[in-house]
Amino acid sequence: FGNGASASLSSHAATDFSKQAKIESIALNDHNLLTAFSNDYGYSNWVKKSIEIYAKHNDLIVFISVSGESENLKNGLNYAKEIGLKTISFTGCNKSNYLKVNSDLGIWIDCSAYNIVESVHTICITSLIDLIIGKAIYSVN
């Protein structure tokens, strides 16, 4: 999950985790789902509701946020932990931001410049996919 550019990165990451690493992944930021859930449950609760409906036992929920303080992501994180799911966050800005401190694993970039943090998040996540695959250069089949 993410907002703005972080939502775009979540879509990119979910695609590569599924396609390249063969790990079933989804990014729940489709505009229809997001606007319907926001309308019915409030913007601050659409992530929580998405997790409630789509998450399965033993899923890992990934939160991407430069600030680590987005209310919708905080509510989603709290719900994920409440139902026993593992969580990871990619954040920046303040070292003690909510997502970093409360995730099972918080990966924090010591920078407050959104474009830099977002770029480093992209490198971290795509490098993680390469580590899972076991190589950085591979053919697309």
Image (cartoon, rainbow, N blue to C red):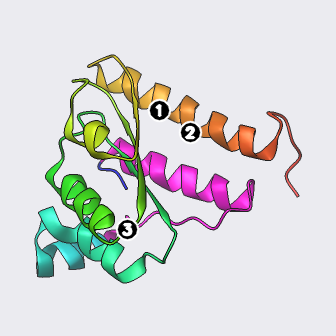
Q: Nearer the viewer, residue 103 or 2?
A: 103
Label 3 CA crowd tier, 10 Å (few <14, some 14–19, many 20+):
few
Please give the name of the residue rendered at 34% of the width and 72% of the height, measured from the top-left corner.
Answer: 51
Please give the name of the residue rendered at 20% of the width and 53% of the height, measured from the top-left corner.
Answer: 74
Q: Is residue 140 above or below residue 125?
A: below
**Residue at image mark 3:** 84
Discs 1, 2 touching: Cβ within 8 Å: yes
> Which element carries disc 2, helix, strand or loop?
helix
Work out how far the residue at label 1 is from the one at label 2, CA to CA, in angstroms. 6 Å
Work out how far the residue at label 1 is from the one at label 3, CA to CA, in angstroms. 25 Å
The magenta-colored residue range is 4-32
**Residue at image mark 1:** 121
- Locate residue 17, reporting x and y percent: 65, 55
Q: Is residue 134 left or right of residue 54?
A: right
Q: Nearer the viewer, mark 2 or mark 3?
A: 3
Work out how far the residue at label 2 is from the one at label 3, CA to CA, in angstroms. 23 Å
Q: Amino acid at mark 2?
A: Ile
Q: Quadrant of the N terminus?
A: bottom left
> Which element carries disc 1, helix, strand or loop?
helix
Label 2 CA crowd tier, 10 Å (few <14, some 14–19, many 20+):
some
